[in-house]
Amino acid sequence: MITSVMKRILFTSLIFTSFFVRAQEINIIPEPVSVKQTKNNAFVFINAGTPIVVDGDAFDKSVNFLNDYLTRFYRIKLRTTPTPIGNNVIRLTFSNPFTTVQNGYKLTVDGNGITIAGDNANSVFNGIQTLIQLLPAPGSSLRLPVPYCEITDYPRFSYRGMHLDCCRHFFPIDYIKKYIDFLALHKMNYFHWHLTDDQGWRIEIKKYPKLTQVGGWRNGTIIGRYPGTGNDSIHYGGFYTQEQIKEIVRYAADRYITVVPEIEMPGHAMAALAAYPYLGCTKGPYEVQQTWGVFDDVFCAGNDSTYTFLQGVLDEVMSLFPSKYIHIGGDECPKTRWKTCPVCQKRIKTEKLKDENALQSYFIQRIEKYVNSKGRSIIGWDEILEGGLAPNATVMSWRGEQGGISAAVQNHDVIMTPGDWCYLDKSQSEHEDSITIGGYLPVSKVYSYEPVPASLTADQAKHILGAQGNVWTEYIGNTKKLEYMLFPRMSALSEVLWSQKMNRDWSDFERRLLAEFRRYDLWKVNYSDAYFELNTSVLPDSNHDGILWKIENKFNKPMFMTFEGTDSTWGYNGPQLIQNTVKARGFFNIDNRTVEVKQNFYFNKATGKNIALAKEPSKNYPGDGAFTLVDGIQNDKGMDRPSQLLGFIGNDCDAIIDLGSPQYLSNVNFHTLKDTGNWIWPPKYVEVFISDDGKNFSSVKRSDDFSSTGRTNVVFKVNFGLVKTRYIRVLAKNTGVIPNGNPGAGYESWLFADEIEIN
Ligand code: ACM
Ligand code: ZN
């Protein structure tokens, strides 16, 4: 019996539904090869009575995934039948629509219902992911409209991967399943599971139980960004039992996803060494590491017992993971211990190896031979190129694209994961509040990635199997943060991997991304809304009375500003003149969220004045030109906020500032960066010159004294006796070639300039 209240609810929800139906666009991510909406406002309505028509059990994985999704998000569960009645059906069927491409499908929604036809069961599963994205988000459990359409689709790359580091932080088995679901929903097919590292060994190995008993746990973790402000002293760890691993492999296989395990060697081995110190060159004692980075203690490459141990580990790994690929790491292995270890040196002699790089190559090749003998293949990070590539190895190119290019030229398969586009541990906003590994990788940059380097020939390009997003978890301690780092960048990457190059279109992706955000809401994932963020810039004021703060949003929404110390809110109608040191905030509202940006402005005599540079900065780090140095913004985020920096490679930063009229001054502060790990060096010195005519300058002071104001931010204070002048020249001398013993030794150093302060 339907009560009148129920009737009213039904009635309003029908009105709501039909209104919603008309507005329902097709927004698939990743973009299919071809999408045709065949009839406007015509829909097939899925409801609890809609059967899935299947003959036999070939499509069980698709049926289960779809039903799981429908149950979870719409509280509908569909039954299967071999013989349909009527047209309100979802038909899964084999066909052979594509002869030259793997895993293609055709999805048709019309008067005969919904049909997904694929050349194999995996193809149909891909089609299921598209069907899921045709559903409204959110939607009513009474009936789910699916627009009439014809979709033809197949993947561009055969390797479409996501990686997860479960060593720096541990993620429980239930969440690994959720992660795998995210992959499936994005038509990704490889999960690279990073299981061993310096900070924890996460896979149970029955032959070597101490790996998890000892190596699975650390006695604390640094607090904050490396090198940290202390240690939390919390016993931390965990591991996956072999039963759990099998469960995950099965769960992934049910979604046509291959799990590629990574067992790191010869570096990143501290957790293994802590468990079995005989595996190291010095024999320990060793500890599971509590901080991040690269450690000198690695597996001894000379001792046969190292290889026996690793083969024992790999035996169990290969019995757990059916994957053709076994990832053996190979990255970031210092040769420090090997250089002084008699056993390693003896190995170099007896194997007639050139040096320690060749020893690493020997190590990897010996392991490769073992893995190959079991019918499997290795993947290694691009360091495995050094000293000679193992004959059958696939290279994962992470230090840029060059490793991948070299490997492809040598006819080796390649998976691209270059840090600048594929490392989802970087910040996705220049105003990021949480700690990240550093660097700036917005969703638009992920989207712009092209996995096939232009320099490869067509034959070499065939070796680029695809690409992968890497999620290192030093600063990702929980699943909320993990989702924040993943979304929406993973969605952008899925399109890089799946969609045809000619179908890649950022502005069209932006339109579909808005629908994707509603899907994230439906899934209750904690995505980043950095995409919505305000673009900000500072412009010179023509009268030099201050600076102009400009804010913009992509959505033509009205914007507002507030300034600390006043209660009023300004409606924004153009760049706002700012004349004093102040904390400013700009914001707008969209989709029930307030998007805001905060900016502190620091005023001094140079702020907003005319400035000219003797030499232009590098094209890669142009900031907003010379004005960046006097725009009132002090960059407090180093390279995480590159738009606020001018970068000079090999060159000096040499600026002349016109104060407009002679003024008294006694101090110049030059704000710069020191990040020698990234080849960024502070200037050798900063020298200040003054002039009344802007032509003839005399030096007043040179200073090589600087102090730290942030993790990588430093300031040179140049103090001198009171002078009166109109023109000031500030010369920051590039330190020149990077000295030996430092990252980038022998190359020209980078000099970064942020702000010039005159007091
Ligand atoms: C890596 O990021 N060390 C492969
Ligand atoms: Zn050794």
Image (cartoon, rainbow, N blue to C red):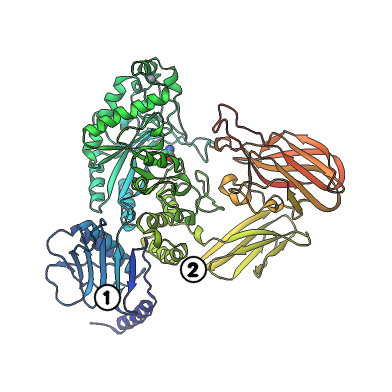
Residue 233 located left or right of residue 35: right
Q: Which structural element holds mark 1?
A: strand
Q: Position of residue 147 (x, y in %)?
A: 31, 74
Q: Residue at x 77, y 54 (%)?
A: 609
Query: Mark 2, mark 1: which one is toward the viewer?
Result: 1
Say what amino acid the circle numbered 1 marks.
Phe
Q: Residue at x 34, y 23 (%)?
A: 279
Which of the two residues, 610 or 285, is positioned nearer the viewer here?
610
Residue 219 located left or right of residue 150: right
Marks 2 and 1 sit apart, C-alpha to C-alpha, by: 29 Å
Quarter residue 508 falls in: bottom left
**If the picture is divided into quarters, which one holds ligand 2?**
top left
Q: Which structural element holds mark 2?
A: loop
Specify whether residue 165 is in view: yes
Specify whether residue 168 is in view: no
Q: Position of residue 141 (x, y in %)?
A: 29, 71
Q: Please say if 434 is above or below 6.
A: above
Residue under pointer 2: 592
Say what amino acid the circle numbered 2 marks.
Asn
Residue 651 located left or right of residue 455: right
Quarter residue 360 falls in: top left
Residue under pointer 1: 45
